[in-house]
Image: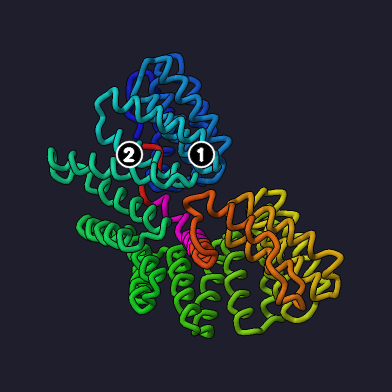
Amino acid sequence: MFVRKEPLSSDAQARLDEVARLYDARDWGRVTATASAEALVIAEELLGVWPQLAAEVYQALGRCYKNTGECARALELHEKQKTISEELGHRAGVAKACSCLGFCYYTMGQYARALELYAEAKAIKDELGDRVGVAKASGNLGICYYRTGKYARALELHAERKAMAMTAMRIVPHEDRAGVAAACNNLGICYYRTGQYAQALELHAECLAIKKELGDRAGMGKALGNLGNCHYRMGQYAQALELYSEAKAMAEELGDRKGVAKACCNLADCHKSSGQYARALELYAEAKAIKQELGDRAGVGKACNYLGNCYYRTQEYARALELYAEHKAIAEELGNRKGVAKACGNLADCHKSTGQYARALELYAEAKAIKEELRGHAVAKACNNLGDCCESTGHYYEDAPELHAEDMAMAEENRDWAGVWEAWEASEPKSSSTTDAPGQGQVEDMAAASAAAAGPKKEHAGHMREQRAKQRSCNKDSAQIFAAGLGEG
């Protein structure tokens, strides 16, 4: 990694060589724990005699800190790398630093800043005539736009990356074959996210073919999982099970415990959707055990949630309550407010199903408060649940109308016409089935005001259900996008 030159003593070179050895072995933890302090001292010494090498040291250490989750420290090092490169007029170095910084900000969820840095990196690479670099930057930008929900722009950028990679291959065969695969994967994920499963299938199949050609077994496993996801969403469970099983076998062969856990969850999803709860429970339990083995507390929490859902479906509420409570405790431990809200809602559902309405009310209220804090649109759902519980506890006329009205107002604000109708229906006393629907004309007027919402209310309800299903469907694969080419390069 670091080339020996005159200003560097043999001792300093040896210490940098050790950092390079650990870096190449991807032993990030040992670099940050044992070797980084000495490397930083050497980098400081090099600033006056060999600044470009100092920038390379900062880059390598920054990546190590990023990969161990210490993004704030990584940002400091990459900022130094960028400053040195700018002072030297080393444009390629500035582009590298921008990409490294962009990756850190992406990892921290600061997508706007990541977009700025990736755009800067792309502009410099274009200026330098680095076509492969431009293609990679386009892919990185596409992933950021995907994360901000701008799927049309993400598709444009991933298509641009694919076209550039294929052009490079026409000039130099196999020049950026991996880039074509990454673009196919990212395009497939975007199409999957928008519910266009047929297009996603084609692209993931193309990605799989390239991964096979390159002998990339890990990449093949991810592509198999993505293909399985598409078949799963199309209700083709037999095909999905076959693909997930292949992905699991490949992960086991590679010793990829994280990949095995993911495949277990995917297989369990299929069995659960087919009503085979016993088998689903076995697989979710296997995934949970692996997550515990890996020390992945967030993963353990998710597995508890999945197991709880299975027990809830089979009306084993006591066991479901235990698992949802474990999920809530882990989410609180990790400061995951969204996870806490989800667990509260699930716990409340269990208590409501067993007639414990007072406790359900408390938990729905807690979920609502957190969702208000997070400004999520799901607050409306929490309001509706609270209203239902108020009715069940005999406090309907005192408390429920206000809650259902809040639900309706949020639905109107979000132009969710099906939600407006559902909130009105929920707000009506159950003994008033013959009462005309007050405000129905208002709902129809609002619907008519939006071309996207035009049509009978049943059509709106179906559309909204479809959109909600599409939104929920894509949480399975957010982690896989990292394997699709996002990075510092």
Q: Does the magenta segment cover residue 67?
A: no
Please, what secondary structure does the residue beneath circle 2 have? Answer: helix
Q: Which residues are magenta?
A: 466-483
Mark 1 sits on what residue?
111
Q: Is residue 78 left or right of residue 483?
A: right
Classify residue 361 as left or right of residue 296: right
Q: Is residue 403 above or below residue 240?
A: above
Q: Which mark is residue 136?
A: 2
* Residue 409 appears in the picture as rendered: yes
72 left or right of 146 in image: right
Q: How many marks?
A: 2
Q: Nearer the viewer, residue 90 or 58?
A: 90
The image shows residue 480, relative to residue 79, as above or below, that is: below
**C-alpha span from label 2 to label 1:** 17 Å
Q: Main secondary structure of the magenta part?
A: helix
Between marks 2 and 1 in the image, the one whose residue lies nearer the viewer: 1
Three-letter residue code for mark 1: Tyr
Q: 10 Å neighbourhood of mark 2: few (<14), some, or many (≥20)?
A: many
- Circle 1 crowding by C-alpha within 10 Å: few under 14, some 14–19, many from 20: many
Determine the residue positioned at 49% across, 62% down.
463
Q: Residue at x 33, y 51 (%)?
A: 187
The residue shown at (67%, 62%) is 381
| Residue 166 x, y percent position in the rendering | 19, 44
In the image, residue 471 lies in the stretch drawn in magenta: yes
Per the image, label 1 sits on a secondary structure element best described as helix
Position of 411 compared to 1: left or right? Answer: right
For residue 107, above or below residue 60: below
Q: Position of residue 190 (x, y in %)?
A: 39, 52
